[in-house]
Image (tube, grey):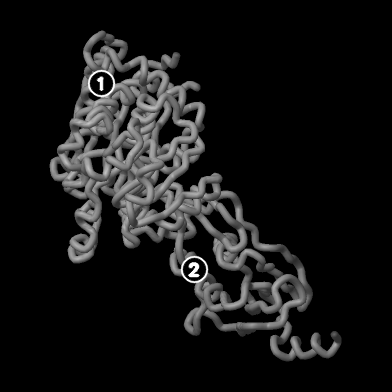
Amino acid sequence: MDLHDKDVVSIRDFSKDQIESILDLSEKMVPYASGDKTERILDGKILGNLFFEPSTRTKLSFESAAYRLGCNVIDVSEMSMTSISKGETLADTIKMVDAYCDLIVLRHPYEGAARLAAKFSLRPVINAGDGAGSHPTQTLLDLFTMREAKGTLDGLSVVLVGDLKYGRTVHSLADALTMFGAKITLVAPETLQMPDDIVSNLEEKGCRPRKTEYIEDAISQADVLYVTRIQRERFPDPAEYSKVAGTYRIDNAILREAKSDMIVMHPLPRVGEIAPEVDDTPHARYFKQAFNGVPVRMALLRAILGGEYR
Amino acid sequence: MMEQHQIKEVKLAPIRNGTVIDHIRCGQALNVMKILKVNESNIDSCISIGMHVASSKGAQWKDIIKIEDRELDSRSVDKIALIAPEATISIIRDYYVAEKYPVRLGEKVVGLARCSNPNCITNKGEPILTEFTVIRRNPVEIRCCYCDRILLNVSDNLL
């Protein structure tokens, strides 16, 4: 597969083989991501990091990935500091930034913003999260973390826990996992269950996700427990948020029911969903998962800008 | 059969010149009227609307509209295809059917409807036409090419 000059907007744009190829290249990038080896294959290139919504891990890991490959970074971190606050359209902003860099990474509060950017940009665009929509590079690093821990992605039993309604990471992840024949269990309060259209889409692809409100129903069979934060900022009504906040908390007592090699993942930040005591168990993978953002994004930058894909 | 035919003719009189939109899904006639943007102030000729009329093909019941002295533009026909995918259009000239064709839904729907997701970038004043992929033809289901959401209430979101 050749990713040279291609956009990365949605995980749906990739086939199973393409995902496997990206993960293979990501694996090769690990020693470079950790600084054990160095490579400056993108020396002289410029990455435009446009973050119109707050981000810590995604923004920093894109910057780290770029610098590790010798690529320079220009960035915007707030909408208020751009001409968008003066009424400029995103389309115009993109056409302007296009002239200043070789690749655009975009996080934006509106769904479909990355698709629009890809349409107006002559340079490749990577979607770093658009509203409650897609976050394909998060999905790739989640898959990479699972494959790294379990040796394969085929037929894993994956339990998704928490905010399955508004959480963009779980929508893209569930979509991608169906390609690998995963057995998916959806654990959420009724009001935060996975939207029907997304469940229908999974069913059309041959996956029959099981729904429950109780982690205890699912944990003993799980290979992967993927926990998400219940996001206060996505709730229109604060009263609704307070009804479901703190519903799930993973601690060592709950993990006694789990397989010894079951891994706990979380896209972070966590706000009480996982007790700190879990950090010291072999189940904890969320900080490794955060690190994996660097080799996966290095693989994408290298494949898109370097044109090399081995 | 003969008797039934005569009764239909009485209910919706033939027109001399104009357009007949037939086999409209039952209950959609008034939504088709919205697409045609006809009202008392902008049309001088007769419009006949038949609702819940016995159908000779497919569904048991249908709606039908006859508009005198007017032929439809392609944009209106494309919109009708979204809410009445089985409809047929007949152009009538001097009481005869000069042309008859079914409405047709392509693979993509461009610039005909707005996305029902208020947070979609297409609802934020960007210089773009909306674009949807047709994922089901009857009943019609379309997915926004930008935000990936399935459009709810097509008839309420026509542009």
Q: Is residue A196 above or below residue A178?
A: below
Give residue B66's position: percent from left, percent from top: 65, 79
Q: Residue at x 26, y 22 (%)?
A: A65
Q: Chain of mark 2?
A: B
Q: Is residue B114 above or below residue A127?
A: below
Q: Nearer the viewer, residue A31 or B17?
A: A31
Q: Nearer the viewer, residue A279 or A95?
A: A279
Side of A283 where A174 appears, left or right: right
Give residue B14's position: percent from left, percent from top: 73, 83
Q: Which residue is mark 2?
A: B155
Side of A235 where B101 appears, left or right: right
Q: The C terminus of chain A is located in which quarter?
A: top left
How far apart marks 2 and 1 lie (CA) works out to: 47 Å
Q: Which residue is mark 1?
A: A66
User: Which quadrant would residue A264 be assigned to in this image?
Assistant: top left
Q: Nearer the viewer, mark 2 or mark 1?
A: 1
Circles 2 and 1: CB distance less than 8 Å?
A: no
Q: Which mark is residue B5?
A: none
Q: Is residue A209 above or below residue A4?
A: below
User: Which quadrant would residue A236 be assigned to in this image?
Assistant: bottom left
Q: Residues within 10 Å of mark 1 (few under 14, many from 20)?
A: many
Looking at the rendered structure, whether the residues under marks 2 and 1 are on a common chain is answered as no
Side of B97 where A65 appears, left or right: left
Q: Amino acid at mark 1?
A: Ala
Give residue A192's position: percent from left, percent from top: 32, 57
Q: Residue at x 21, y 22 (%)?
A: A64
Q: Chain of mark 1?
A: A
Residue at disc 2, secondary structure: helix
Q: Residue at x 54, y 58 (%)?
A: B141
Q: Amino acid at mark 2?
A: Ser
Residue at disc 1, secondary structure: helix
